[in-house]
Amino acid sequence: MIRLLSVADTISVSNAVFGFLAVLVLVSNIFEYDFSIHLSLSFILMGLLVDGIDGIVARRIGGSRIGDYLESMADMTTLVIAPSVFIYFVYADVVENFLDKYVYLVFSLVLFLSLGIIRLASFHIMKKDEVFVGLPASAGTIILLVLGYFKVELVYILPAIVMIGALMASNIRFLKPDLRINGFAFILIVLTIIFGKNYYGFAPVLLFIGIVIYSILGPVYIHFFEKKVDTKISK
């Protein structure tokens, strides 16, 4: 089976490893709470960066027959399971004495997990050249991570979890970012890993704002310039 792997596949496996480490950090109780949160966030973001690299490598030097399946499985670990555990860990102390809030939190995360798995399982079937069908899992993950990182009120995080899960599994089309936007996002992700909440949390805040703008304006752009996008897709 190892012989089936390409270089890009080994990078995809490292993506899953980062997702596993993100969960392990939270449940091990080795580190201080705030550091555990930042380290887990950093591992997920590193997995997200690696997820972008494996696609580039596959296009440059070729993939393998199991590449698409392996990528989806790795993304499920890093972009669905790990963020769900991250959010639960952050808000566990908030809901522990309130059964109704606990049920709402678990229900929201189960729904996000289910919709996220559906999104990733169908990604390569519904793959388009110019657009993403459904909110990219990477974008949804970043939004949830930043909200959880700053521990926004439970009344805001719960609908956000459900909404992001629904958008990920929707048929709404989102533009694929160009190289400049991806490069800007890459820089902000690296700065978030390095600085975290330091300097007023400028890096994660800017990253969050950028992703939200993309999530809102992307479908709007496609709606008003649908003929132009459809023409590109059909070529």
Image (cartoon, rainbow, N blue to C red):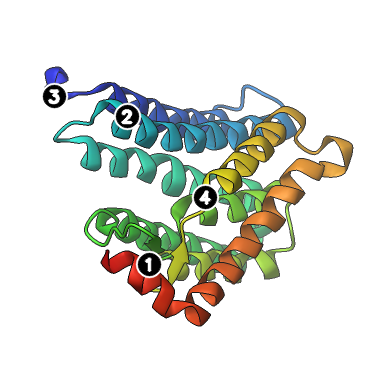
Answer few, some or many: residues within 10 Å of disc 4's Cα (few below 14, many 20 plus, some between 14 and 19).
few
Q: Quadrant of residue 42?
A: top right
Distance (Cα) linking label 2 and label 1: 29 Å
Distance (Cα) linking label 2 and label 4: 17 Å
Examine the rendered structure and indicate whether residue 92 appears above or below residue 111.
above
- Left or right, 155 with respect to 69, comes to right
Numbered circles on residues, count: 4
Q: Are marks 2 and 4 in contact (CB under 8 Å)?
A: no
Distance (Cα) linking label 3 and label 2: 18 Å
Q: Residue furthest top?
A: 3
Q: Nearer the viewer, mark 4 or mark 3?
A: 4
Answer few, some or many: residues within 10 Å of disc 2's Cα (few below 14, many 20 plus, some between 14 and 19).
few
Residue placed most toward the observer, 235 or 103? 235
Residue where numbered disc 3 is placed: 4
Q: Are marks 4 and 3 in contact (CB under 8 Å)?
A: no
Residue where numbered disc 1 is placed: 169
Distance (Cα) linking label 1 and label 3: 30 Å
**Residue type pointed to by label 2:** Arg
The answer to whether any part of residue 150 appears in the image is no
Residue where numbered disc 4 is placed: 178
Q: Which mark is residue 60?
A: 2
Residue placed most toward the observer, 54 or 159? 54
**Residue type pointed to by label 3:** Leu
The answer to whether any part of residue 220 appears in the image is yes
| Label whose residue precedes the other's in the sequence (4 or 1) | 1
| Label whose residue precedes the other's in the sequence (2 or 4) | 2
**Residue type pointed to by label 4:** Asp
